[in-house]
Image (cartoon, rainbow, N blue to C red):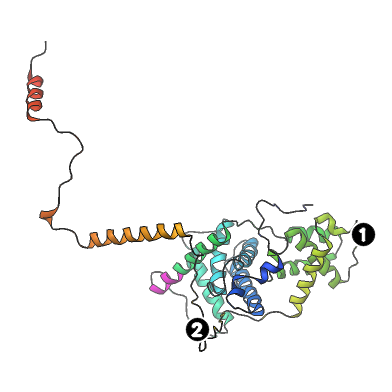
């Protein structure tokens, strides 16, 4: 049985303190609202992957990437529905389930319906048709959010899921069919919480199996130095934290939150624009970007106002032209009889 995750690839983990100091919290989003928005985005990603008939791992990968994404980017910059569509679009490519001819259109159509259903709209409007301005705007937002996520995550996209370890541990501990089904459901419920960015897959699997055994009434072997979770490479503290967090999430499921609005305290305070934005560039990068923009503006101005035909200068050839004397010598030698 595998124990620990790949530390070189699956290395995106944060502490509880770092999770509490997220960009959304810095923007004034309450912790309860952030937790609800994260859960909503993860649920949309799971449902969207199922509606797209993608492989089972696509939705789970998208949910984990969403939690990592919101550790780097604020909810005010990327709303849950927008981020869920973009990260599912990215997970399709990671799982090689991407069809360049129709994936963007299908992803936009599926998440358009899912968002309308989450808002309780009885008869939603049809998704925008390809070729229209609305479709091009939605596609541009999808691609821009995906690029922001790639930059924010540093292109570290490997995700190790606990499901395989959950099945192995459930079989090893003889949880039975009911206990195994409960453990599988709890592993899916983990994806709606920030647990995948707090603990690696072995610790998640151990906590899930521990809680499933308690709910199913199956006794588990215990003992100092010989606990069963040591086979998975987990600790008692990590198992207890995962089990307690899952139990609390099941007891108080968060509401559906699609719109995150923060009162800035300035006469009602308008919320920040829900447009994905990248982190501010460094000073050298900003200067390079400004110089490139100035050059592009000069080029556009020159192209818009070309000089008259008579004022255009013919380009000078870099080859040295022969003098008249050299030309006469060449012609004379060319027609001279052979020796």
Depth order, front residue of 330/174: 330
Residue at 60%, 78% in the rendered image: 29
**Residue 2 x %, y %:** 77, 52
The count of marks equals: 2
Coordinates of residue 301 in the picture (x, y in percent): 25, 62
Q: Is residue 131 magenta?
A: yes
**Would you place residue 169 above or below residue 118 in this image?**
above
Percent across and percent down for residue 134 are 41, 74
Residue designated by label 2: 270
Identify the main secondary structure in magenta.
helix
Identified at 50% across, 75% down, the residue is 274
- Helix, strand or loop for disc 1: loop
Front residue (pair 91, 128):
91
Binning the other alpha carbons within 10 Å of mark 2 as few (below 14), some (14 to 19) or many (20 upward) gives few
Q: Is residue 186 left or right of residue 144?
A: right
The residue tagged 1 is: 224
Q: Quadrant of residue 231?
A: bottom right
For the record, the magenta segment spans 129-138
Q: Judge from the rendering whether residue 173 lies leftward or rightward of residue 77; answer left or right.
A: right
Q: Could you tell me which secondary element the residue under label 2 belongs to?
A: loop
On screen, 12 above or below 267?
Answer: above
- Please give the name of the residue rendered at 62% of the width and 62% of the height, measured from the top-left corner: 58
Relative to the observer, which residue lies in front, 157 or 49?
Answer: 157
- Could you say where residue 226 lies in the image, as x and y percent from the top left? 90, 56
């Amino acid at each position: 049985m595998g124990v620990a995750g790949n530390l070189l690839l699956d290395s995106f983990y944060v502490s509880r303190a770092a999770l509490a100091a997220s960009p959304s919290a810095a923007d004034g989003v309450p912790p309860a609202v952030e937790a609800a928005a994260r859960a909503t985005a993860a649920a949309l990603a799971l449902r969207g992957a199922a509606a797209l008939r993608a492989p089972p791992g696509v939705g789970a990968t998208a949910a984990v990437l969403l939690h990592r994404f919101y550790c780097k980017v604020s909810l005010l910059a990327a709303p849950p529905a927008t981020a869920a569509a973009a990260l599912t679009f990215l997970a399709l490519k990671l799982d090689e389930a991407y069809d360049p001819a129709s994936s963007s259109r299908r992803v936009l159509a599926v998440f358009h319906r899912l968002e309308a259903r989450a808002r309780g709209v009885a008869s939603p409007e049809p998704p925008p048709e390809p070729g229209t301005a609305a479709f091009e705007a939605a596609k541009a937002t999808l691609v821009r959010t995906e690029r922001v996520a790639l930059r924010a995550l540093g292109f570290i996209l490997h995700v190790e899921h606990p499901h395989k370890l959950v099945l192995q541990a459930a079989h090893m501990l003889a949880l039975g069919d009911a206990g195994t089904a409960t453990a599988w459901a709890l592993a899916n419920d983990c994806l709606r919480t920030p647990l995948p960015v707090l603990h690696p897959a072995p610790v998640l699997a151990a906590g899930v199996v521990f809680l499933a055994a308690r709910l199913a009434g199956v006794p588990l072997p215990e003992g100092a130095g010989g606990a069963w979770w040591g086979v998975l490479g987990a600790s008692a503290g990590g198992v207890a934290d995962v089990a307690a967090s899952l139990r609390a999430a099941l007891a108080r499921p968060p509401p559906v939150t699609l719109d995150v609005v923060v009162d800035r305290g300035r006469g009602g305070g308008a919320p920040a624009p829900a447009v994905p934005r990248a982190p501010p560039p460094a000073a050298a990068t900003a200067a390079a970007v400004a110089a490139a923009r100035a050059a592009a503006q000069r080029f556009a101005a020159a192209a818009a106002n070309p000089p008259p035909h008579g004022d255009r200068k013919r380009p000078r050839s870099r080859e040295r032209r022969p003098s008249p004397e050299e030309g006469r010598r060449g012609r004379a030698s060319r027609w001279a009889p052979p020796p």
